[in-house]
Amino acid sequence: MSTGHRSHIMLSLEQAVGAAPTLAALQERIRESRWCLDQIQHLIPATLRPHVRPGPLQDQEWCLLVASAAASTKLRQLLPSLQQALTQRGAQVNAIRIKVQTPGR
């Protein structure tokens, strides 16, 4: 019985993502979403910031994930100023959606 020798090539996550166009595109969208949150963070009240996470960015629509309906309500009041700040910074975001996401999802 002969055992074949397999060469094991270790790739970093960055290398693996770079080798797969779909993963690279996903990584870029995640990076853009985080950048958008960085641009508006100062407009979100400090007590609300820990409850807001960047969500998907697709077709110029960005989603913010929030931990509760109360956080969603407060954030909705800020949408015009958030949208304006993103536009001023050159973000390609035409709409912001807010989604309540409970823990475990």
Image (cartoon, rainbow, N blue to C red):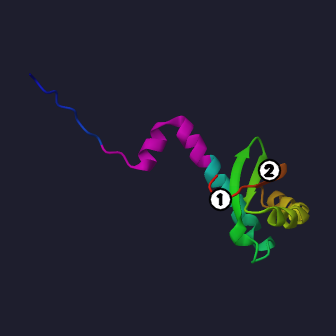
> For numbered disc 2, what is the local secondary structure?
loop
Residue type at mark 1?
Pro
Q: In x, y percent, where is residue 52?
A: 72, 64
Which residue sits at x=84%, y=50%?
95
Q: Quadrant of residue 76?
A: bottom right
Segment colored magenta:
10-28
Residue type at mark 2?
Val
How many other residues sit within 10 Å of disc 2, few (<14), some (14-19) or many (≥20)?
some
Residue where numbered disc 1 is placed = 103
N-terminal of the two: label 1 or label 2?
Answer: 2
Contact flag, marks 1 and 2 (Cβ < 8 Å): no
**Outermost residue toward the left in this view:** 1
Q: Quadrant of residue 101?
A: bottom right
> Is 52 placed above or below 98 here?
below
Q: Name the mark on residue 93.
A: 2
**In the image shown, does 41 or 69 lie closer to the viewer?**
69
**Outermost residue toward the top in this view:** 1
Q: In x, y percent, where is residue 3?
A: 13, 27
**In the image shown, does 41 or 46 lie closer to the viewer?**
46
Judged left or right of residue 91, residue 83 is: right
Asked if residue 92 shows in the view, the reply is no
Which residue sits at x=60%, y=48%?
28
Q: Please identify, in this view, whether the residue under mark 1 or under mark 2 is nearer the observer.
A: 1
- Quadrant of the image for the N terminus? top left
Q: In x, y percent, where is residue 73?
A: 87, 63
> For numbered disc 1, what is the local secondary structure?
loop
